[in-house]
Every structure is written in C-alpha cells, then in structure tokens.
C-alpha cells in the first residue's frame, strides 16, 4: 500500500515539461478523433449536397451518428493478415502512419496561450514528421503482397518526393520574411486584419503550398496512391478493421495538420478581427478543410504524368522564382 | 511556345474555378433524390421493367395477344412460354353459335384464345425483342420497380393471370 502523499511526491518528481507533453498528446489524440468524426460527416454531407442527394440521413437525426456507426463497424471487423505478408511490418505500417501525426499537433499554436510545445524548430519538425508517413505507406504497400498495394505505394513515394520540393520552396519565403521556424512567432508576426496576413504578401506561395498540401495528404485530385477506380484502394487494399481505420484517421489528421500549417503561415494563425483566439484558428482551419473537400468532389483525378508535370514544370519553377523575388525584395 | 503553354495553363486554371462554381451552385440547390422508404418518386413513366400484356380495348380481362408465338421464338433467353386454346375448337364453338354458314370457312375466323402467358423473369435479359416483334402490340414494359422475392419461383410470372388480377382490382376500385 503506497501512501497518498508518496504518490503526490512521485507525481511532483516528474518534470513539468514531460507532464505537459503527455497531457498534450492525450489532448491531441482526442482532437484527432473528434476531427475525424466531424470530417467524415462533413465530407459525406458535402459530397451528398454537391451530388444533390441528402448524404447520410438514416443513423440519427440527419445522419449525425453515421461516423460512430462507421467506427463501430471498423472496430468490429476481423483483423486479417494476407498470406505471405510480413505480419510484423504489415501491422507496424498503420502505426507508423499515425504516430507522427500526433507529434505534429504538439507544435501548432492553436491560440495565444494554447500551444503544447513552443519550439524554435516547429516548422522543421512538422515537415520532418509528416515525411515519415511516406515510409509507412511504402511499408504498407510492400508488405501487403498485393500488386495494387505495391503500385499505390510506388505512386505515393514518387508523388510525395516530387511535391515535397515545391512545398519547402513555398514555405521558405515566409521563413525568410519572419526569420524564424517558430510557428508561434510566425503567427505573431501577422496582424489581426486579413490584409496583414502573409497571404497578401505571398499569394503565389500560398497557392503552391495549398496544391502541394493536397498532394502530400493524398487528397483528390491527387489521390493516385489510393485511386479507387484503378487500384481498388491503393496501399491500404488489404487492410481491414482498425488497420484501415488507422490509415483513415492519419489521413484526416494530416489534412488537419496541412490546414493548420496553412492557417499559421498564410492566414494569420489565431489572429482575427476583434478578439484573437483559438476560435479564429479553428474557423480558418475548417474553412480550409471545407475547400479541400469541395475540391475533392469537383475535380477528376489527374493522370500520373500530369501529376508530375504540374510539379516539375510549374510548381517548382514558380516556387523558385517566387523565392528569388522575395529574397531580392528582402535584401533591398 | 512558352506563351502558348502559359495561356493554356491560365485557361486551365480558370476552368478549375468554373468547375468549383458549378459544384458550389449544386451544393446550394435542393436535393433531387427522395428518401425512399418514406417517399417515392411520383412518376415511373419510361421505366422499362419486365414485360406485361396489354389489355384488350373492349375487354380489360383479355389480352391483345393472338398467340402467334413470335415472341417465344425471338426471345434470346427462351424465357417466354404461352399456351393457347386450339383454333379448331374455338372455331367450332364459334361456328356452332353463329350458325351453319360459317362452317365452310372455319380457318379464317379461327382465333386462338390465350390460356396462359408465362414469363420466367429469372432468365429475362430485358432486351425488349418480344415487345418489338409483337405484331398485335400486345406486349409492353411494366413500370413495376418494387420487385423482390425470396425464391426463384416468385419470378416465374403468369402475365395473363397478372393482367386479369389487375383488371379485377381496377374494376373493384372503379365500382
């Protein structure tokens, strides 16, 4: 029997920074879960309305319980490993996909006082950890013992590698303008009003960044790694139950991260007319997510050569020019 | 060359915006589908379901069918079979009723009467050749959408019985 005072002392002995990170991770997990529920519903409803049908309607009033029904179905499904698959790596892949997403949320400044971990390398951290997702998809495709999965993984790698370059090049102007990788400082350098946001100074970088974010998160029209009509479901063809659910969750998590980073870099972060705070941040993030969903249900999927042409022929040269012009202006 | 490709790209970007405008317009407009079990569409006109017999203008209990068997012969799935009373018998009856003069030319007046017209809908490929080939216009597509059953036997339909049942129902509703 341990005495209560002893437990308190033990808790006090834990460094406060560690406690904050732990609590933050817990909060992040719930935030990701909530977002996924909301986004699943939003995505299906928006898709429905764009197709002029009601969307999910039967489970709960106006179908609001549909995501829970989907989730329960996925939890209840049999966990199945295909024959010949390396079962360790096979089940490691969804976890590798999910884990970095949790870390990325730690450094995002949701509000003036709502940031779990303020670090000087926030932007670099996000770029590095989102890059790990590529590895997860590669492992998933490779270990699935399935041609569709393998093709999906191959597509994802070449797509991600290609689109990371313009993504970085479109972030750099902002970094040079603010002189910091700290996301909180970048947000603080922008004012309350829309014309004080970096989107006004860097509209081209914003467009390039947004297109690259769509491609990096495998969203339509760049959803080649999971092209339904060609590859069944791409890299997660063989995954059932929670394996698939984790990929699904991480995809939505990366979408939210992309929207968050876009909001911080270009749309003033938590600043907004009136009182600045997390409400402005969430509003911006959700507007961006809605635009992503809107884009998905509007455009057809690009072909692979088109995908790479857009990247190498347009985005990279434009991003380089944009960066050079910005550097010139800063230098003068 | 560069100017041309830039122009093409700008036009392409513009077309993307046009596309987003189209979807946003549709997003705001009301649904065009209905919540099926609680509501159903008003008109099923133009729906091409399984075939049905066209009732005779004079007698809604009888079909226009002349039992020529052309639908049976043309059906690629061989799913139509019909039975008709033999023309001789019918002619004889008719002759007996009308009088002795018609006995000399029984074949001309002979009209086979349809006894049953069985459609095995399990094998029907909905090609519509029977409707096209019918010389008397006795076949048409039904608008019966709500077909579901637990056994194959439920889709072996006697269309003549169906016609008579419908006529009876209609008569009951009118009378």
Image (tube, rainbow, N blue to C red):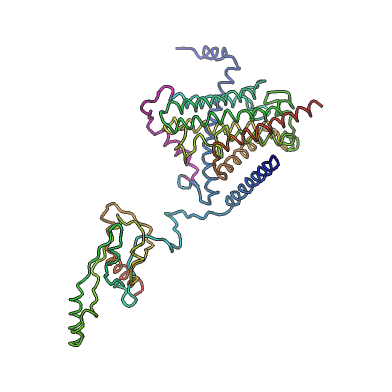
Residue A242 image point, x, y percent? 44, 31
The region drawn magenta spans: A60-89
Q: Is residue B46 left or right of residue A218?
A: left
Nearest to the observer: residue A218 or residue A186: A218
A22 vs B6, nearest the viewer: B6
Residue extending farthest to the right is A332
Q: Quadrant of the C terminus of chain A?
A: top right
Query: Residue at the spot x=42%, y=28% of the render?
Result: A144
Q: Quadrant of residue A85?
A: top left
- One can see residue A68 in this view: yes
Answer above or below: position of B61 versus A124.
below
Q: Which residue is at 59% across, 35% downward?
A: A214
Outermost residue toward the front?
Answer: B1
Q: Which residue occupies the foreground of this view, B100 or A294?
A: B100
Is residue B8 depicted above or below B84 in this figure?
above
Q: Is residue A317 magenta?
A: no
């Amino acid at each position: 029997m341990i005495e209560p005072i002893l437990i308190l002392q033990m808790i006090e002995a834990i460094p406060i920074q560690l406690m904050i990170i732990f609590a933050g991770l817990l909060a992040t997990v719930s935030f990701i879960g909530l977002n996924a529920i909301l986004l699943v519903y939003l995505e299906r409803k928006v898709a429905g309305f764009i197709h002029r049908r009601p969307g999910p309607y039967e489970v709960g009033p106006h179908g609001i319980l549909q995501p829970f029904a989907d989730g329960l179905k996925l939890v209840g499904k049999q966990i199945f490993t295909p024959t010949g698959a390396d079962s360790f790596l096979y089940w490691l892949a969804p976890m590798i996909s999910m884990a970095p997403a949790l870390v990325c949320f730690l450094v995002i400044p949701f509000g003036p006082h709502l940031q779990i971990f303020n670090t000087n390398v926030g932007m670099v951290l996000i770029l590095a950890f989102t890059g790990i997702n590529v590895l997860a998809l590669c492992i998933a495709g490779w270990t699935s013992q399935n041609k569709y999965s393998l093709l999906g993984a191959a597509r994802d790698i070449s797509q991600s590698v290609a689109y990371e370059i313009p993504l970085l090049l479109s972030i750099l102007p902002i970094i040079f303008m603010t002189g910091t990788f700290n996301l909180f400082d970048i947000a603080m350098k922008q004012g309350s009003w829309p014309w004080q946001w970096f989107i006004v100074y860097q509209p081209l970088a914003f467009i390039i960044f947004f297109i690259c974010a769509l491609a990096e998160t495998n969203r339509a029209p760049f959803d080649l790694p999971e092209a339904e009509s060609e590859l069944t479901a791409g890299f997660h063809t063989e995954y059932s139950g929670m394996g698939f659910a984790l990929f699904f969750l991480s995809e939505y998590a990366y979408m939210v991260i992309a929207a968050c980073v876009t909001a911080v870099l270009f749309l003033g972060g938590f600043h907004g007319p009136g009182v600045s705070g997390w409400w402005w941040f969430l509003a911006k993030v959700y507007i961006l997510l809605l635009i992503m969903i809107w884009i998905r249900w509007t455009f057809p999927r690009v072909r692979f050569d088109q995908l790479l042409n857009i990247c190498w022929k347009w985005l990279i040269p434009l991003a380089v020019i944009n960066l050079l012009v910005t550097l010139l202006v800063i230098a003068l | 060359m560069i100017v041309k490709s830039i122009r093409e790209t700008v036009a392409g970007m513009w077309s993307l915006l046009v596309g987003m405008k189209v979807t946003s317009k549709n997003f705001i407009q009301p649904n065009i589908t209905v919540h099926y079990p609680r509501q159903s569409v008003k008109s099923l006109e133009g729906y091409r379901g399984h075939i049905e017999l066209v009732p005779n203008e004079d007698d809604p209990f009888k079909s226009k069918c002349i039992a020529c068997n052309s639908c049976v012969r043309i059906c690629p799935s061989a799913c139509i079979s019909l039975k008709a009373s033999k023309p001789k018998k019918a002619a004889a009856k008719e002759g007996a009723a009308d009088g002795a003069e018609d006995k000399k030319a029984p074949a001309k007046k002979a009209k086979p009467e349809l006894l049953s017209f069985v459609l095995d809908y399990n094998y029907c490929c909905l090609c519509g050749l029977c409707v096209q080939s019918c010389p008397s216009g006795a076949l048409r597509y039904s608008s019966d959408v709500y077909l579901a059953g637990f056994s194959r036997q439920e889709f072996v339909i006697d269309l003549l019985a169906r016609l008579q049942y419908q006529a009876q129902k209609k008569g009951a509703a009118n009378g």
